[in-house]
Image (spheres, coloured by chain):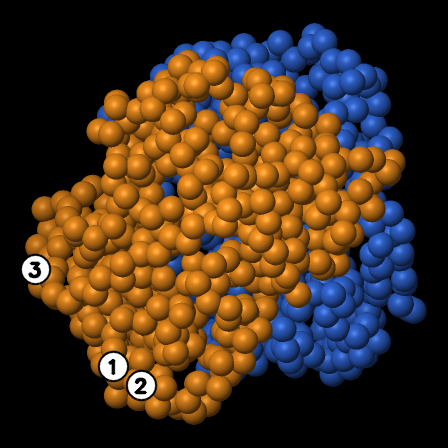
Chain colours: A orange, B blue
């Protein structure tokens, strides 16, 4: 269903489908995660929302989007493995369903070009007032990270666990680095980014492929021939078990545990690891939920999530502070049970269905579809979701046990109440 | 009654519906291009339905706060098993939610759809509550309540409702309090269940990849096997709620890095006539969007004056017998934000709105509606929401097209009065 073409410095991915009533244009700029560029990269999405060459004020840009039947524009930064991705999305109503047949597709693509390559600027710099204001916005975002305790605990776990590795870099950047960012330096960096980053553009929806390609190539070009592939040094870390306890005024403690899986998306064991995660903590029927929550009533939530490109696994639970040691032990017991193959063939079968179901469902959402397909770019493989599902269905009990044996516990992180006694 | 087929040509969708003999309303939306099917079984019963006459009784009773949500949790547990596991075994992911006005059970799956639909119907229609399991659940829900207690967003939301509504139970937390749920008994659960989970009070909506005839037969066969009492319309009682807000200002202290300020607009506190509902809801939505979305006149002012940041949001929730809108942000200057925001809201009665503005509002809304139709979940949930007002979700786009400048002007003239606004601030002591 996905067809990929590289032209004029852009890798296009066309996905023609009748599932949706809109057409999605998604651009992904990819570069290695680095401490000295992250704050700039975190700021750029905010700046892109402030206006373009033809629509030099946010209000004018937003009006243009509204005129395009509520065109939906968003830009954000994310961390995938040790890459930083800036994603810019424009979602347009499919003219087929509009009362008057309009040319909003071509107008939309023209706008997309401006959003990517011509943000509002003055010669060789961004507008100082905009940059100062958006620095303020990002600063508040960084400060408010501490308010969502689940997110905060996860961020702290990663910082402790991956100290010294690029993966520990905060995706929203650093407050102390913001002072050094100015309108000139940021513009220079942005120019560098649009030239040097790997750029993938996804088009999803019910459209005419030939016309779409023509219109895109009329508007979007980059002078990079061919695109430079950026590969990361896959430095291997030895796990060292450690425990970190932090105290704040919270009522519910967050117990998060990080593991090194030594398996990433392109590895042969990846499908088995996917199944491992499903059995261990990926679903309400998994060991963690059934034991920590249902059997022992220790937590409102208890689950695990995998990080596919760096090779990590995280366990999350929200517990009463006094239950720390008990919960930690139960989680460890479940992990050992996985290594010992303590799960039935039937459970294995069911979880494979659940995962396949989840992947197929993700393909029913335009954004989910793009994220799933982009995994291949990130891992530099050509394993599409269909193939991944087929491999998952073929995973055996032995495969899961083998994958489990590669996984090592690394860091236990506890965010708990002040003054309590949560010794291990 | 025969299956009713309704085709909506402008969006290329067809809905099949039927009201079964036992009163259950069934809606089927086949979408063959999707991999999955989403199915939701919803009762017209939420956290606000605390005072009512139980089925077969004469006298009204008042049940503990948080019981609808408690009941939702308990339905998943059966004598010998957990229903989540049943769905998992059949490759489906199940969930449920309780809102102010609804409790809904749902699953999505890409295979074994028919079997999963039967599981959905059966588990909701075959309750099993024991003293022991009710006690056990109290610990789990207490954890859930405490988790919400630590979330500044949720506290800001509930505090704003408490400031607006004096008596209407919308001001009570959906999950109740640790204290109120401790009073819940097995008997309370059965009373609420038998009253509100009668098929006549429920809707089943299925959207996705399935065969309509097979599905309708399966549902009918399943329902014909079950016995339900004859029932009349449920008598529910809500306290008298004045149109003005309860508190014009409310301050809550809680550990937050940046204070949170929310302006509540109390839209109404008693039952709204069905005829005016849709217009009111649509206009409230598009006008709020016009003013407060990025690029909107008021958003720009608040932003320029440095009173809001990225966390700024607005929402509106209009139900049958209550309605509110919220405008909120993280801000280091909550007083200045609330003063300015109120001033702007109070100026809306004489806001100069042009034909061009209205055309833009309508286009934006049409685009939003189309986008929302990418999601089976959204369609199903909204369909059930609007059906309570005898409106079809798929008729909304044509309805938006009928709105005029005069409608917008008329709406703005009467929308905001000082006594309908409250300000709620969450900050460190």
Residue B92 appears in the figure: no
- Mark number for residue A423? 3
Percent coordinates x, y for residue A105 in the rendering: 74, 39
The answer for which chain carries disc 2 is: A
B409 relative to B323, above or below? above
Image point (58%, 53%), residue name: A6
Percent coordinates x, y for residue B217 in the rendering: 81, 79
**Mark 3 or mark 2: whose residue is earlier in sequence:** 2
Image point (48%, 80%), residue name: A392
* Label 1 environment density (alpha carbons within 10 Å; few <14, some 14–19, many ≥20): some
View extreme (front): residue: A225
Residue at label 2?
Answer: A401
Between disc 3 and disc 1, the foreground one is 1
* Label 3 environment density (alpha carbons within 10 Å; few <14, some 14–19, many ≥20): few
B84 relative to A93, above or below? below
Tell me, yes or no, whether the two marked residues, 3 and 1, touch with CB atoms within 8 Å.
no
- Specify whether B260 is left or right of A210: left
Image point (12%, 65%), residue name: A240
Q: Nearer the viewer, residue A254 or B391?
A: A254
The answer for which chain carries disc 3 is: A
Q: Nearer the viewer, residue B126 or A51?
A: A51
- Specify whether B105 is left or right of B217: left
Q: Does dot 1 land on a helix, a strand or a loop?
A: helix
Between disc 3 and disc 2, the foreground one is 2
**Quarter of the figure that contains the C terminus of chain A:** bottom left
- Mark number for residue A405? 1
Tell me, yes or no, whether the two marked residues, 2 and 1, touch with CB atoms within 8 Å.
yes
């Amino acid at each position: 269903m996905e067809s990929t073409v590289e032209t004029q410095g852009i890798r296009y991915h066309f996905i023609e489908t009748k599932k949706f009533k809109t057409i999605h244009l998604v651009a992904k700029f990819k570069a290695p995660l680095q401490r000295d560029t992250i704050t700039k990269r975190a700021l750029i999405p905010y700046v892109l929302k402030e206006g373009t060459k033809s629509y030099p004020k946010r209000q004018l840009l937003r009006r243009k989007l509204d005129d395009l039947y509520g065109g939906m524009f968003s830009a954000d930064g994310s961390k995938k493995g040790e890459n930083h991705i800036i994603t810019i999305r424009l979602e347009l109503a499919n003219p087929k369903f509009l009362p008057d047949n309009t040319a909003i597709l071509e107008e939309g693509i023209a706008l997309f070009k401006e959003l990517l390559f011509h943000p509002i600027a003055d010669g060789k710099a961004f507008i100082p007032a905009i940059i100062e204001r958006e620095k303020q916005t990002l600063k508040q975002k960084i400060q408010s990270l501490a308010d969502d305790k689940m997110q905060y605990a996860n961020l702290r776990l990663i910082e402790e666990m991956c100290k010294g590795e690029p993966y520990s870099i905060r995706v929203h950047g650093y407050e102390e680095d913001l002072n050094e960012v100015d309108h000139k330096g940021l513009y220079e960096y942005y120019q560098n980014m649009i030239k040097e980053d790997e750029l993938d553009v996804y088009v999803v929806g019910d459209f005419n492929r030939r016309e779409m390609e023509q219109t895109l190539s009329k508007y979007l070009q980059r002078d990079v021939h061919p695109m430079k592939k950026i590969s990361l040094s896959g430095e291997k870390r030895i796990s060292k078990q450690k425990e970190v306890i932090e105290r704040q005024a919270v009522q519910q403690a967050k117990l998060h545990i990080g593991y090194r899986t030594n398996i990433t998306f392109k590895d042969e064991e990846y499908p088995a690891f996917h199944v491992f995660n499903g059995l261990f903590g990926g679903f309400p029927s998994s060991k963690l939920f059934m034991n920590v929550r249902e059997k022992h009533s220790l937590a409102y939530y208890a689950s695990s999530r995998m990080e596919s490109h760096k090779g990590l696994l995280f366990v999350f639970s929200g517990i009463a502070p006094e239950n720390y040691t008990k919960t930690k032990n139960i989680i460890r017991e479940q992990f050992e049970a996985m290594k010992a193959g303590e799960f039935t063939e039937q459970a294995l079968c069911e979880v494979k269905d659940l995962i396949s179901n989840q992947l197929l469902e993700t393909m029913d959402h335009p954004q989910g579809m793009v994220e799933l397909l982009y995994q291949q770019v990130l891992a530099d493989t050509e394993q599409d979701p269909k193939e991944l599902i087929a491999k998952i269905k073929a995973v055996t009990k032995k495969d899961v046990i083998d994958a489990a044996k590669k996984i090592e516990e690394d860091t236990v992180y506890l965010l708990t109440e002040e003054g309590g006694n949560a010794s291990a | 009654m025969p299956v009713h087929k309704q085709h909506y040509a402008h969006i290329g969708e067809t809905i099949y519906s039927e009201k079964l003999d036992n009163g259950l309303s069934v809606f089927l939306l086949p979408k063959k291009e999707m991999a999955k099917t989403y199915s939701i079984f919803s009762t017209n019963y939420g956290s606000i339905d605390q005072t009512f006459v139980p089925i077969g009784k004469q006298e009204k009773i008042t049940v503990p706060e948080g019981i609808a949500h408690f009941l939702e949790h308990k339905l998943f547990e059966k004598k010998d098993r957990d229903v989540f596991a049943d769905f998992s075994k059949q490759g489906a992911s199940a969930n449920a939610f309780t809102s102010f006005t609804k409790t809904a059970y749902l699953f999505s799956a890409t295979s074994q759809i028919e079997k999963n639909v039967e599981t959905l119907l059966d588990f909701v229609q075959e309750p099993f509550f024991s003293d022991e399991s009710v006690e056990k659940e109290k610990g789990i829900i207490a954890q859930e309540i405490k988790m919400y207690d630590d979330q500044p967003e949720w506290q800001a939301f509930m505090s704003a409702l408490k400031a607006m509504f004096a008596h209407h139970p919308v001001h009570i937390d959906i999950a109740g309090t640790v204290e109120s749920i401790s009073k819940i008994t097995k008997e309370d659960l059965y009373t609420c269940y038998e009253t509100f989970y009668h098929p006549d009070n429920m809707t089943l909506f299925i959207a996705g990849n399935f065969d309509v005839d097979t599905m309708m037969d399966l549902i009918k066969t399943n329902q014909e096997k079950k016995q339900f009492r004859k029932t009349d319309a449920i008598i529910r009682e809500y306290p008298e709620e004045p149109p003005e807000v309860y508190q014009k200002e409310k301050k809550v202290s809680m550990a937050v890095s940046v204070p949170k300020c929310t302006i509540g607009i109390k839209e109404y506190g008693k039952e709204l006539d069905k005829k005016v509902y849709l217009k009111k809801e649509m206009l409230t939505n598009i006008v709020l969007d016009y003013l407060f979305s990025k690029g909107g006149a008021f958003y720009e002012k608040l932003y320029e004056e440095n009173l809001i940041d990225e966390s700024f949001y607005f929402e509106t929730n209009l139900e049958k017998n209550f309605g509110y809108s919220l405008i909120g942000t993280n801000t280091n200057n909550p007083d200045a934000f609330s003063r300015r925001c109120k001033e702007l809201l109070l100026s809306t009665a004489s806001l100069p709105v042009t034909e061009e503005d209205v055309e833009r509002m309508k286009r934006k809304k049409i685009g939003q509606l189309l986008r929302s139709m990418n999601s089976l979940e959204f369609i199903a949930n909204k369909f059930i929401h609007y059906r309570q007002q005898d409106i079809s979700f798929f008729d909304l786009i044509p309805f938006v097209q009928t709105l005029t400048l005069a409608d917008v002007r008329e709406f703005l003239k009467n929308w905001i009065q000082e006594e309908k606004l409250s300000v709620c601030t969450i900050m460190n002591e």
